[in-house]
Image (tube, rainbow, N blue to C red):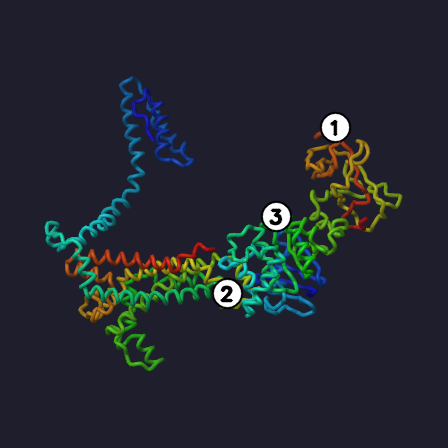
């Protein structure tokens, strides 16, 4: 949008231009232009110049106003872009760069040493802790992720069919864990899973007559973390599935009732197939979330350290250490940012690969309806 | 196949709203009965009560003499065709049609045979492997009907099945439905708000208004001898003209003479009744044009040319609504603004009392 820049002969005309320019620059696509611009026109036109020397001043002022008017929208949206560039895009690109260097951040940028793909080779071939953390991540991803969907699907169907007015209240309760601080949740579960006084052990003892379990032992810690993850996200998935169920036309269920379908058959033959696109979406989110799992094991395994620190290292034998935690400890624990970046990018590629597989598995026929 | 009886059937929603106020109706075996009425008159609700998709608050519904109030929808021997077709989008046409039999545990061969037969009747055999989304509206409608046929129901229920189709297709499907009924001969109940569908399809029509049946009968009976002003106004297009009237003071001869405001008087060859007529109903095709001075004085407002006929709208002194008159051709010199005389054919005139009930129709 080119604006006329040559100084117009008199302020009235100038004001008219200003109003047009402002209209062009700011209010494109809106309809209330005249209301806002007429104010400017009045504002500029009121001081009637007595002689020709006074003409230049209002013209220059209006030009400044014009530039500000044009710049303002960019100014208003700039905070996001500045923050994104500084804290988003730059670190992202820099981490690719760093992943090809040996670098202790304390030595400054001058201490960077080119190592080519050595970091990647090391992580893939020799980094036992990474392999273990990846195994842990997969274990917890399946143990914590799969049941989310196995429970959320029927739960959403149940909420849909069994509740009328109170449905949203129940959904809200199920959703609560998702919006609660992970640290708070993890602390609560730390005491729930406490060996001597925890409610979980008390219940297991009462119901199954089990000995008190030390949940932070390597053979149990993944189970405990998976349970917390499951508990936290099952409500979120329920909300996703419930919203999708609500879009299924009621006619289909009624037609199925007329065809003699029981509740279970309606779920099996109508709800489930109709939910396939949402299942694909929700499973994708779970895959990505599971592979990035960090907060829950980080806080939960801190308790086992017993030294009062709130940063876990994965617990005994690092049995609860996730791949994302490995990135963290490699980078900020061992100051090895090159290797940490390489791990992060390998993790990214695994996520991409898993998402692709999921697409093959569940995403293919979602357009089929 | 079986007949259907409704005995004092009522429906009250949990919030206390009464929607069906005690309906008694006998549907003969093999009959095609149309429920017609304006939106919200309860016709669809009643159909869904017969289907089992809505609870019955009071009264009994019998199919083939058996009370089915508490019978599962799928065991009532009824099949329903929905307005939206309600085809299962993830199943093929064949799977859609065979779903009920599959749930009933029929063998694959039996299902295939039943689906094949139904597809043949409806001429959709070539569509059996397709998904509903690839079909046109008319094809989807056929599949929905096919799904009902496969179940071999005693009573077919149609819930406004043609409303989602365009006008041309609607006419075609209407003819096919009539053919289908002739072919399989089942009892069919058909809900519509379209009076043309009601008039053309039904052996009989049940005309609903506000949760009650206003009148049941053969289409032409309802058209020619409406029991109430509501029925008279609902059937026919353009609708029947209703003119405010009062008995003329000079009623001495024993036959009824009505005065229509300042427009004139009309003499009907029927006895004076006890009730006071307040409205005179006459259909557009039952008014003829006459010389000014004869008949009712009217002023031409508008002429609509329909090709095969002309609809003239004329205003009568003292009447709020213009009167529609169907003319077979456009008479010379008839223009908006002209003054004409209108002559209602006395033998086709209906008169209504203050409650809207028809009085001793011709």
The answer, for residue A26, to whether it is visible in the render is yes
Marks 1 and 3, how far apart at CA: 39 Å
Q: How far from the left and from the top, in percent, is residue A230?
A: 34, 66
Numbered disc in front, either 2 or 1: 2
Q: Which mark is residue B169?
A: 3
Task: Report the side of A161 relative to B316 (left or right).
Answer: left
Chain identity of mark 3: B
Marks 3 and 2, how far apart at CA: 32 Å
Which secondary structure, mark 1? Answer: loop
N-terminal-most mark, 1 or 3: 3
Marks 2 and 1, how far apart at CA: 68 Å
Task: Report the side of A94 relative to B213 (left or right).
Answer: left
Which residue is tagged 1? B333
Numbered disc in front, either 3 or 2: 3
Which residue is tagged 2? A266
Total numbered badges shown on the rendered structure: 3
In the foreground, B225 or A345 = A345
Task: Report the side of A287 relative to B334 (left or right).
Answer: left
Which secondary structure, mark 2? Answer: helix
Residue, far top = A51
How crowded is the residue under tag 2: few (<14 C-alpha within 10 Å), some, or many (20+)? Answer: some
In the rendered view, tell whether residue A50 sits above or below residue B315: above
Tell me what residue is drawn at x 31 percent, y 68 percent.
A226
Q: How far from the left and from the top, in percent, is residue B270?
A: 85, 47
How crowded is the residue under tag 1: few (<14 C-alpha within 10 Å), some, or many (20+)? Answer: few
In the foreground, A263 or A354 = A354
Q: Are marks 3 and 2 in contact (CB under 8 Å)?
A: no
């Amino acid at each position: 949008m080119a604006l006329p820049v040559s100084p117009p002969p008199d302020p009235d005309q100038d004001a008219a231009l200003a109003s047009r320019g402002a209209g062009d620059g700011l209010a494109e696509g809106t309809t209330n232009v005249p209301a806002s611009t007429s104010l400017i026109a009045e504002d500029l036109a009121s001081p009637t110049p007595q002689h020709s020397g006074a003409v230049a001043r209002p013209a220059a002022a209006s030009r400044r106003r014009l530039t500000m008017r044009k710049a303002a929208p960019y100014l208003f949206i700039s905070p996001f872009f500045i923050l994104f560039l500084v804290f988003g895009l730059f670190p992202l690109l820099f981490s690719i760069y760093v992943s090809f260097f040996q670098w202790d951040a304390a030595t400054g940028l001058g201490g960077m040493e080119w190592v080519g793909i050595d970091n990647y080779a090391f992580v893939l071939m020799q980094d036992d802790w990474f392999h273990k953390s990846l195994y842990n991540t997969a274990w917890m991803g399946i143990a914590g992720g799969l049941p989310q969907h196995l429970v959320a699907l029927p739960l959403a169907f149940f909420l849909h069919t069994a509740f009328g007015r109170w449905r949203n209240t129940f959904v809200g309760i199920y959703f609560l864990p998702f919006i609660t601080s992970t640290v708070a949740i993890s602390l609560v579960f730390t005491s729930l899973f406490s060996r001597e006084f925890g409610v979980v052990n008390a219940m297991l003892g009462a119901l199954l007559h089990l000995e008190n379990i030390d949940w932070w032992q390597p053979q149990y810690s993944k189970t405990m973390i998976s349970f917390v993850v499951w508990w936290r996200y099952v409500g979120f998935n329920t909300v996703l599935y419930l919203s999708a169920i609500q879009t299924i036309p009621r006619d289909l269920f009624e037609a199925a009732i007329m065809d003699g379908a029981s509740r279970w058959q309606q779920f099996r033959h109508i709800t489930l197939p109709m939910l396939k696109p949402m299942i694909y979406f929700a499973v994708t989110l779970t895959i990505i979330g599971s592979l990035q799992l960090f907060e829950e094991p980080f806080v939960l395994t801190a308790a086992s350290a017993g030294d009062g620190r709130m940063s876990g290292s994965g617990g005994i034998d690092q049995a609860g250490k996730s791949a994302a935690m490995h990135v963290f400890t490699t980078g900020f624990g061992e100051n090895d940012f090159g290797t940490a970046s390489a791990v992060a990018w390998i993790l990214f590629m695994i996520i991409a690969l898993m998402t692709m597989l999921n697409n093959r598995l569940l995403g293919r026929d979602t357009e089929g309806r | 196949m079986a007949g259907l009886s409704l005995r004092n059937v009522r429906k009250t929603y949990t919030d206390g709203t009464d929607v069906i106020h005690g309906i008694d109706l006998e549907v003969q075996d093999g009959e095609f009965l149309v429920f017609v009425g304006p939106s919200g008159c309860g016709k669809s609700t009643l159909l869904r009560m017969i289907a089992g998709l809505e609870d019955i608050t009071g009264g009994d519904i019998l199919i083939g003499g058996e009370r089915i109030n508490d019978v599962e929808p799928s065991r009532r021997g009824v099949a329903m065709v929905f307005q939206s077709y309600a085809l299962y989008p993830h199943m093929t046409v064949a799977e859609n049609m065979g779903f009920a039999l599959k749930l009933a545990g029929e063998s694959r061969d039996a299902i295939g045979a039943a689906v094949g037969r139904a597809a043949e009747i409806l001429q959709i055999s070539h569509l059996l492997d397709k998904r509903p989304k690839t079909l046109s509206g008319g094809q989807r409608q056929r599949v929905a009907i096919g799904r009902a046929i496969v179940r071999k129901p005693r009573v077919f229920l149609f819930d406004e099945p043609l409303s989602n189709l365009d006008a041309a297709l609607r006419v075609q499907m209407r003819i096919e439905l009539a053919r289908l009924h002739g072919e399989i001969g089942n009892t069919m109940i058909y809900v519509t708000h379209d009076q043309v569908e009601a008039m053309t399809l039904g052996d009989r029509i049940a005309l609903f208004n506000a949760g009650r049946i206003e009148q049941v009968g053969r289409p032409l009976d309802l058209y020619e001898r409406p029991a109430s002003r509501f029925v008279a106004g609902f059937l026919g297009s353009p609708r029947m003209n209703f003119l405010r009237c009062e008995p003329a003071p000079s009623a001495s001869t024993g036959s009824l003479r009505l005065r229509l405001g300042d427009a004139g008087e009309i003499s009907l060859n029927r006895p004076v009744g006890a009730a006071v007529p307040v409205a005179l109903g006459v259909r557009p095709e039952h008014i003829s044009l006459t010389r000014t001075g004869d008949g009712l004085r009217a002023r031409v407002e508008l002429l609509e040319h329909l090709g095969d006929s002309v609809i003239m709208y004329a205003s009568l002194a003292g009447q709020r609504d213009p009167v529609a008159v169907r003319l077979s051709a456009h008479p010379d010199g008839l223009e908006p603004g002209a003054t004409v005389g209108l002559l209602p054919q006395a033998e086709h005139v209906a008169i209504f009392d203050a409650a809207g009930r028809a009085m001793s129709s011709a």
